[in-house]
Amino acid sequence: MGARKKRNSYHGRFNEGSIVKKALKIIGGFLFIFLLYVVGSILHGSLTDFSPEEIVALEIGGSENIPIIIKDSTLSILTWNLGYAGLSAECEIFYPKQGLLRSKGHMIRPEKSITEKNINQGAASLKEIQADFYLLQEMDVIAKRSHHIPMHNQFQKNLASYGSSFATNFLVKRVPMPVLQPWEAYGDVHSGLASFFKYKPAESTRLQLPAKHKWPDRIFHLDRCLAVNRFATEWGKDLVLINLHNSAFDKDGVMKAKELEYLKTLGLTEYEKGNYVIVGGDWNQSPPFFPSDTFNKKKGIKRKGTNIAAELFPENWSYIFDPTVPTIRSSSEIFDSEKTPRGLIDFFLISPNCRALQVKGMNQDFKLSDHQPVWMEVRLQ
């Protein structure tokens, strides 16, 4: 009886050991496949990485029936980050709170009907607002996040009487986030800075900004750039109109500082030649001295933000913004007018030979994007 019990005990331990070994093999197999997926994603991203030259001439499209010389000294300009038609008030995005591994039920991309609504209404609203120039950011050409709807083409159709240029700043074959949900990956992205104009530019140029994330992060991030459109005026000077979208995920501020120094050199050089310089876009920083909690004080909401250094440009250069209307809201949650943090990071910078006549932040309650448009009327002096 005793010997038989001993044999059964050995047999039980043998079975337990086999089960543990099988479990470890299965776990090891999954880990190996996951590691292979991660390495493969990085390798694929590296081999297909978008690496443009510092200076790239842009194709000028749209209407051919537009003047080539500006004769009116009073002009209107609108800047708006469209949030790729996927960050309207009813949307939120997973990575600000959840990181890059799992979405935990948060939105990776909106329903297609939401994207279609944002594109159609966004394009229609520009026609209603009316401006001589539109400087738009986060405009998708084709991307999984916007359901492969040709967003830029739709805006061009609605602005058929305008010329246009497009500077790519986000071109990735496959963004693998969230990493632990490859079946729901962010996917392919082709997006950038879209400029529309009632006058034909003498030239349009993409200028690569100097700062980049470290490898391998940089292969899945935006390649920040400036879209520079140069227009001739009747009185011999050029209007240099710059569309801008500076770095967002830059904890130590090093990238932002390099980008702004590059912009400063460009702007001052053009102004010293006697040209007019106007910069508009999403700066991902507030103007000098503008309090980051301006729109959150009453509700006790905290919003972290940084300001452009006052000494960056000479005192006779002017930052033009509407201090009464927020231009950005937190996209880590569905918009709630009582709770969602808001700030002001979309505005204009003009050289001393330009004078702002009006500026209006357009309060849309973030119905079409996590940003709101800003419109300015300016006089070239």
Image: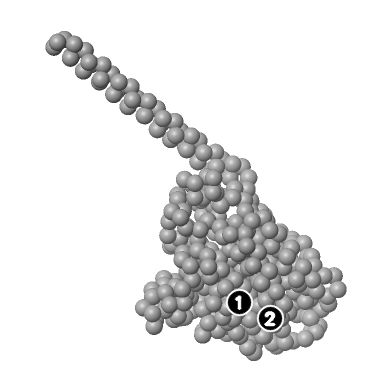
Q: Which residue is mark 2?
A: 129
In front here: 271 or 177? 177
Q: Give the structural element (helix, strand or loop) at label 2.
A: helix
Expressed as whole percent of the image width and height from the top left, the position of residue 268 reads 62, 75
Q: Give the structural element (helix, strand or loop) at label 1.
A: loop
**Relative height, residue 169 to residue 101 (above, below):** below
Which residue is drawn at the image coordinates 62% and 62% (left, top)?
Answer: 113
Q: Which residue is mark 1?
A: 373
Of pointers 2 and 1, the one earlier in the residue sequence: 2
Which residue is drawn at the image coordinates 55% and 55% (left, top)?
Answer: 221
In front here: 22 or 131? 22
Expressed as whole percent of the image width and height from the top left, the position of residue 58 reads 74, 62
Q: Quadrant of the C terminus?
A: bottom right
Amino acid type, mark 2 = Ile
Which residue is drawn at the image coordinates 63% and 68% (left, top)?
Answer: 118
Q: Is residue 247 left or right of residue 351?
A: left
